[in-house]
Image (spheres, rainbow, N blue to C red):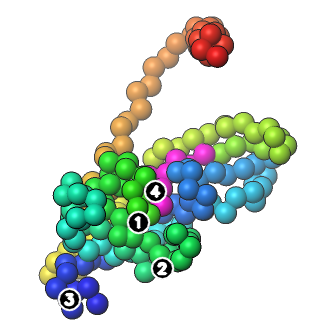
Amino acid sequence: VLRSLGIPTRVITNFNSAHDSNVNLSIDKYVDTSGKTLHLTEDSVWNFHVWNESWFIRRDLGSFYDGWQVLDATPQERSKGIYRCGPASTRAIKEGDVNLDYDSSFVFAAVNADYVTWIHYSKKKKKKIYSDTRKIGKFISTKAVGTNSRVDVTVNYKYPEVKGISFKIPYSQYKNSLMDDRKILVTAL
């Protein structure tokens, strides 16, 4: 429909697409002390999800957010009481401007949420045991004009992932650094 009105529009596919049902910008997985998955959240990671992008001028948000806008014809969550998603500026998503209208936080999570695993001890006690900041939002793609080639548009949605720097320190030094952190935290309170 948008193309018939002369509005540039394209289909986007996001692989490892997060569905953040509680809008906390993370996909939370809970396990018990034996490692068995507990179903305490509706968060999930889909193999892929597809939406549209259309090129708009954003007078409501300012010219910084002009350009490609996400429009999802198959929203899974209510937005301001109705099932809809967008138009969310890809620029806002990339910059982490998740407080803007039109579901920027939901789309941000779809492409950039942290995947966090928790041990669930009780209703009041849980412990984070794993966090993956690179799992979500892979090979965000569209079809090339005039060919069947894939065009990677991930850079429109997020900055390149920074590779971790590994280094080794003695365990005792690591343990002491944790104690120093606790002293700072206690002092700050």
Q: Which badge, 4 or 3, comes first in the chain's sequence?
A: 3
The CA distance from mark 4 to mark 2 is 16 Å
In the image, residue 45 sits, relative to residue 55, either above or below, namely above
Question: At label 3, which amino acid type do we have?
Answer: Leu
Question: At label 2, which amino acid type do we have?
Answer: Thr
Q: Which badge, 2 or 1, comes first in the chain's sequence?
A: 2
The CA distance from mark 2 to mark 3 is 21 Å
The CA distance from mark 3 to mark 1 is 21 Å
Residue at horizontal 60 percent and vertical 45 percent from the top: 116
Residue designated by label 4? 105
The CA distance from mark 2 to mark 1 is 14 Å
Q: Which badge, 2 or 3, comes first in the chain's sequence?
A: 3
Residue at horizontal 32 percent and vertical 48 percent from the top: 95
Query: Please, what is the dominant secondary structure of the magenta stretch?
Result: helix
In the image, residue 152 sits, relative to residue 29, either above or below, namely below
Residue designated by label 3? 5
Residue at horizontal 52 percent and vertical 51 percent from the top: 25
Residue designated by label 2? 74
Residue at horizontal 81 percent and vertical 40 percent from the top: 124
Q: Which badge, 4 or 2, comes first in the chain's sequence?
A: 2
- Regarding residue 175, the answer to whether it shows in the image is no
In the image, residue 185 sits, relative to residue 109, either above or below, namely above
